Structure formats: C-alpha cells, structure tokens
Image (cartoon, rainbow, N blue to C red):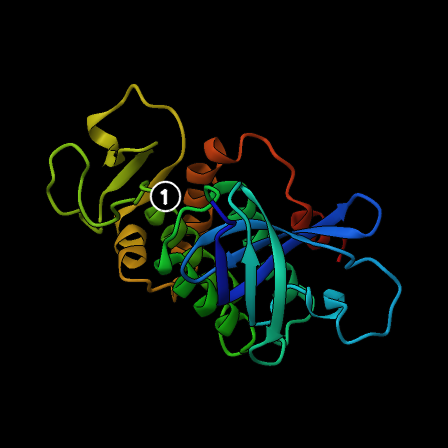
C-alpha cells in the first residue's frame, strides 16, 4: 500500500527540534488532523534556496502543509505561508508559547479535533490585540482545552447535588468531578472558591480580580495531573522578564 498523501492542510508549528544531521522534527497542530509530528528533511541545511522550508517553520505563522507517510512519523513534502506571522512580543509571546507547550504535552497524536484549532486561533488573535487581558485569554483557552480532552469543569452547578451554585457560598474543587459545597465537606482541606467567582468563570466574565485569580488557581489544579511534572519552559521566560 503506498504512503498516504495529505495535501495543503491549515496548520501551525508548535515546536521544532533537530533530527539526524540536517533535518527537523516538527510538531504541528493541523485543522483537520490534530497534532502530528513531521520530518522536515534537509531543513537545517545552510541554504538560501526558496526550497528550504526552515524560514517558514516558525510558531504562530498560519501555514498550508502537505505530508506523506503511513506511520506516526510522517514526512513534510510542501509548505506555503497562508498568512503573515501573527505579531506577538513580550508576555503575549510567552503566553502563546505556553499554549504551544500545553498542546504538545496534552494532545494525542493524530486525534482530529477542529474545536481546539478554533480555540487556538482565537487565543492567538486575542494575544495579538493588546486590548485583551492576557490572563483572561489564557484561562479561556485552558478551560476549552480541558473540555476538548474530556475533562470539562462545570462552573455553574454543584457536582453532588446538581443545584445551581450560589454566589454567596464557598466551594471546593474536586479533581475530575467539579465543585462541592465547602460547608457540606468539613473533611476537605484546601482552597475554597466563592460562588460569585465560579459563576463569573462559567460565562467567561473575568472583570472581577477575584474571578481572574480564582480561574488561574483552578486551571493550575486541573491541569497539573495531566502535565505529570513535565517542565514548562515558557514559565521560565515569564519569571526571567
């Protein structure tokens, strides 16, 4: 059976790393085929030729890519810039790099899901616009990613009683379950969250500082088990600048 050929798919580069003497391994997010790893043969050769794709293999540039192969490691055959690179600098850039790391670590190879591609493009658009809050943009993306992975967090109802949360009450987060009333679980030790913040998160309203802080803490708690202590290099960039 000949290798399968996929032609000109909308993609973004998530990460690259050296492969053998002159090639690169390229982790991509494709609109129709999910996360894939492609071999860009000869991409590390010193060449001014327009055939060398290295100058396009940059994160945050919309690309059209073609590849071939039957196994998990496929070969990049052609590439085109679909649009100019999305302008990102400073903490906006580091935030986008953080999103890339989450996708590389958490998405299954070859698992197509167009929703996460849409959420990723939305995040990049928000990060390129200084009018948007970086923190709010990241929280929306993190919670959307958790939902895509099958770990959606319910922010509007008590996970035990299924009753609507009350703005005046406090709740504990239980991993992979949701929120339970703090006064009903005196045995739980840990951080509790006010219902008003949780209800704000449920409608992506992060105007209250308390809501934004609660969202950050909850996202960290929810993602931690799936990251399995793998290092996030983007966080090092945040801390050093």
SS at mark 1 in the image: loop
Q: Quadrant of residue 210?
A: bottom left
In the displayed structure, does residue 60 sit left or right of residue 191?
A: right
Q: Nearer the viewer, residue 11 or 88?
A: 11
Give the percent coordinates (x, y) of residue 201: 32, 56
Residue 204 visible to an observer of this rendering: yes
Callout 1 crowding tier (Cα within 10 Å): few <14, some 14–19, many ≥20: some
Quarter of the figure with the C terminus? bottom right
- Residue 72 to residue 90: above or below: above
Decide if residue 22 is on the left or right side of residue 169.
right
Q: Position of residue 169 (x, y in %)?
A: 22, 43
Residue at (27, 62) in percent of width and height? 203
171 or 61, nearer to the observer: 61
Residue shown at the point (45%, 46%) measured from the top left: 110
Q: Label 1 belongs to which residue?
A: 149
Residue under the point 19% across and 27% down: 184
Residue 221 place in picture, x, y as percent:
44, 37
Q: Nearer the viewer, residue 129 or 213?
A: 129
């Amino acid at each position: 059976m000949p290798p399968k050929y996929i032609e000109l798919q909308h993609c973004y580069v998530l990460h690259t790393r050296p492969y053998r003497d002159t090639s690169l391994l390229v982790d991509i997010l494709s609109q129709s085929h999910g996360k894939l790893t492609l071999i860009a043969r000869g991409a590390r050769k010193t060449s001014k030729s327009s055939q060398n794709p290295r100058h396009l293999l940059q994160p945050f540039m919309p690309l059209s890519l073609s590849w071939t192969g039957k196994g998990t490691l496929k070969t990049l055959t052609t590439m085109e810039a679909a649009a100019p690179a999305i302008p990102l600098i400073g903490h906006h850039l580091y935030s986008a790099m953080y999103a890339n790391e989450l996708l590389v670590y958490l998405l299954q190879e070859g698992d197509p899901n167009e929703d996460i591609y849409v959420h990723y493009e939305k995040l990049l658009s928000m990060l390129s616009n200084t009018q948007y809050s970086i923190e709010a943009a990241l929280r929306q993306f993190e919670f959307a990613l958790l939902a895509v992975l099958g770990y959606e967090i319910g922010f509007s109802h008590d996970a035990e009683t299924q009753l609507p949360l009350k703005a005046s009450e406090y709740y504990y987060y239980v991993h992979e379950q949701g929120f339970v009333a703090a006064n009903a679980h005196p045995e739980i030790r840990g951080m509790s969250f006010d219902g008003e913040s949780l209800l704000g998160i449920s409608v992506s309203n992060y105007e209250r500082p308390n809501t934004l802080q609660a969202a950050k803490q909850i996202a960290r708690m929810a993602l931690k088990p799936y990251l399995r202590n793998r290092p996030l290099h983007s966080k090092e960039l945040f801390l050093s600048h």
